[in-house]
């Protein structure tokens, strides 16, 4: 799970540079390699589902799989809505899981403080969402290790 996350993001970072979000990598990849984004989402989420010990985390991982399914989020409004709300729901549910079931309040604190700081810096730092997504993925990986 963590190796999928690190390898995919390192590959994208080295090949295409800083993107505005992890999802934007779908459009940076050549069309014949767009499947890599779906593979990344599922390669992270499927092991996480098996490691999840509560419903919040289980459904958060399921929503990450929906993010991968709706990877072509610029295609139409339905796909964009499915992609964005699945990603948002995954973050919210995973953080609720960390709070209520894993009792890792310090990880919630890191996520919350990071979200506030990065949101305030959004006009000066275009890749703020990528960093926030990395933090969200890593908080889940830490508790599911």
Image (cartoon, rainbow, N blue to C red):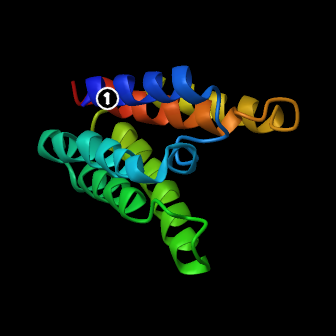
Residue 72 sits above or below residue 45 on the image: below
Residue 104 shows up from this direction: no
In which quadrant will I find the N terminus?
A: top left
Residue 33 vertical placement versus 6 (above, below): below
**88 or 81: nearer the eye?**
81
Provide residue 142's location: percent of width, then percent of height.
32, 23
Q: Residue furthest left?
A: 50
| x and y, in percent, of residue 63 in the image | 36, 59
Specify the quadrant of the image occupied by residue 120. Answer: top right
What residue sits right under mark 1 in the picture?
A: 141
Mark 1 is surrounded, within 10 Å at the Cα level, by few (under 14), some (14 to 19) or many (20 or more) other residues, namely: some
Pick whichever, 98 or 130, lies toward us. Answer: 130
Q: In the image, is 34 to the left or to the right of 39?
A: right
Instruction: Give the SS element for disc 1.
Output: helix
Q: Nearer the viewer, residue 79 or 124?
A: 79
- 31 or 45: which is nearer to us? 31
* Residue at the spot 35% in from the left edge and 23% down from the top edge: 7
Residue with the most extreme right position: 123
Quarter of the view holding residue 44: top left
Q: Which x, y percent locates residue 140?
A: 35, 34
Q: Quarter of the image for the C terminus: give it.
A: top left
Rendered residue at 20%/49% (across/down): 54
Q: Is residue 20 left or right of residue 93?
A: right
Residue 102 visible (yes or no): yes
Residue drawn at x 50%, y 49% is 26
């Amino acid at each position: 799970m963590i190796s999928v996350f690190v390898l995919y993001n390192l590959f994208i970072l080295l090949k295409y540079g800083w993107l505005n979000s992890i999802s934007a990598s779908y459009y940076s990849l050549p069309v014949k390699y767009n499947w890599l984004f779906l593979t990344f989402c599922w390669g992270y989420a499927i092991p996480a589902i098996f490691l999840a010990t509560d419903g919040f985390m289980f459904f958060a991982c399921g929503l990450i799989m929906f993010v991968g399914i709706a990877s072509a989020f610029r295609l139409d409004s339905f796909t964009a809505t499915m992609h964005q709300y699945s990603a948002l729901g995954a973050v919210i549910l995973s953080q609720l899981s960390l709070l209520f079931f894993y009792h890792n309040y310090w990880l919630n604190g890191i996520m919350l403080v990071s979200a506030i700081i990065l949101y305030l810096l959004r006009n000066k730092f275009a890749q703020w969402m990528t960093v926030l997504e990395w933090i969200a993925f890593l908080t889940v990986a830490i508790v599911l290790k």
